[in-house]
């Protein structure tokens, strides 16, 4: 018989003394649409990937993508109980509650995650709309949130819940503030349909700065934040494009060989365009992405919309 002592699990890692099946990284996607599936394709095979879905019809598609589906509904807190202590890292991509000033969905999710040993990291996909109108100024993450719309105010409430969870549990909770997402292989991911409809844009003197991120770069930012995001940290997830909205549509029209859209005064647009579109034309800001590159060490595959709009 060997005189060597038995090899015991390492105690240097919180997961070291557990059976091997529990030491495997388990990533929970809360909301697994287009961006979630792009994230799934980036993760290595040894990572166990789970996704919360409220649609039984999506179960097969998620399994085909290598994701373990978990049926549950963010509007039904009782259905979330199984999530407690389940994942080592959580990526929250789901939209906020559709009404009111509070995001009850994120509040209920973080309450469940607090019940048992929490994940090492929680990443929340928010929106740059929480900054409100900045009159075209450069915006860093230190700028105070001044949301002007109910939708953006619900996002601010969700961010508070995420920060509270991080402080209460000692978890690295990161918030990604995301502008317009685009990609040629994403449903409605380019301006082509709007150009084909002939929807007008604002004239130069009334126009607003707009910000963008390619869907693939956003997915890469999500993965980077899961491992590199700092505790209670906000990141602007935007590319290097510096264009006003009208110039963006002119660029897309030229790339697609379509007529450039007509330019109208703001007063005219208020009578011709839907409120949902006007809301995007009422806020102007330029997002600083220095922290994204420096702390998350993300090298953009599509640094400008010019490169991203023409690549499948």
Image: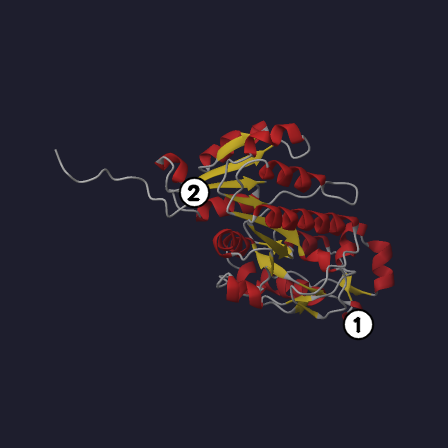
Q: Secondary structure at mark 1?
A: helix
Residue 201: quadrant of the picture: bottom right
**Residue at image point 55% right, 34% down:** 83
Residue 130: quadrant of the picture: bottom right
Pinpoint residue 110: horizontal percent, then vertical percent: 63, 41
Q: Residue furthest left?
A: 1
- Which mark is on residue 25? 2
Residue 104 visible in the snapshot: yes
Label 1, residues with CA under 10 Å away: few <14, some 14-19, many ≥20: few
**Residue at image point 56% right, 55% down:** 231
Of residue 245 and residue 84, the one placed in the foreground of this image is: 84
- Which mark is on residue 205? 1
Residue 100: quadrant of the picture: top right
Label 2, residues with CA under 10 Å away: few <14, some 14-19, many ≥20: some
Q: Secondary structure at mark 2?
A: loop
Of residue 305 and residue 132, the one placed in the foreground of this image is: 132
Residue 274 visible in the snapshot: no
Pointers 2 and 1 in contact (C-beta within 8 Å): no
Label count reads 2
Pinpoint residue 57: horizontal percent, then vertical percent: 57, 28
Residue 31 lies left or right of residue 7; in this view the side is: right
Pinpoint residue 79: horizontal percent, then vertical percent: 62, 28
Residue 117 lies left or right of residue 125; in this view the side is: left
Pinpoint residue 63: horizontal percent, then vertical percent: 47, 33
Mark 2 or mark 1, whichever is nearer to me: 2
């Amino acid at each position: 018989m060997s005189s060597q002592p038995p090899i015991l699990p390492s105690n240097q890692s919180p997961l070291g003394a557990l059976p091997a099946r529990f030491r495997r990284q388990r990533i929970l996607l809360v909301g697994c649409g287009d961006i979630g599936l792009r994230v799934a394709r980036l993760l290595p095979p040894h990572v166990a990937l789970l996704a919360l879905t409220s649609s039984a019809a999506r179960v097969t598609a998620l399994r085909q993508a290598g994701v373990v589906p978990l049926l549950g509904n963010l509007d039904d807190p009782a259905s979330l109980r199984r999530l407690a202590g389940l994942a080592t890292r959580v990526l929250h991509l789901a939209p906020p509650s559709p009404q009111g000033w509070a995001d009850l969905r994120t509040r209920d999710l973080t309450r469940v995650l607090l019940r048992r040993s929490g994940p090492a990291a929680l990443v929340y996909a928010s929106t740059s709309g929480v900054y409100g109108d900045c009159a075209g100024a450069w915006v860093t993450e230190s700028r105070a949130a001044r949301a002007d719309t109910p939708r953006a105010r619900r996002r601010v409430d969700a961010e508070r819940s995420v920060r509270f969870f991080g402080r209460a549990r000692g978890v690295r909770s990161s918030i990604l503030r995301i502008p317009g997402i685009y990609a040629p292989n994403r449903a409605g991911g380019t301006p082509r349909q709007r150009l084909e409809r002939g929807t007008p844009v604002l004239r130069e003197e009334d126009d607003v700065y707009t910000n963008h991120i390619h869907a693939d770069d956003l997915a890469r930012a999500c993965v980077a934040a899961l491992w590199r995001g700092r505790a209670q940290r906000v990141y602007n997830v935007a590319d290097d494009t510096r264009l006003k909205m009208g110039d963006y549509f002119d660029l897309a029209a030229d790339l697609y060989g379509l007529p450039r859209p007509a330019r109208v005064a703001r007063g005219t647009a208020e009578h011709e365009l839907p409120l949902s579109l006007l809301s995007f034309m009422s806020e102007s800001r330029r997002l600083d992405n220095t922290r994204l590159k420096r702390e998350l060490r993300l090298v953009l595959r599509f640094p400008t919309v010019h490169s991203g709009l023409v690549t499948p």
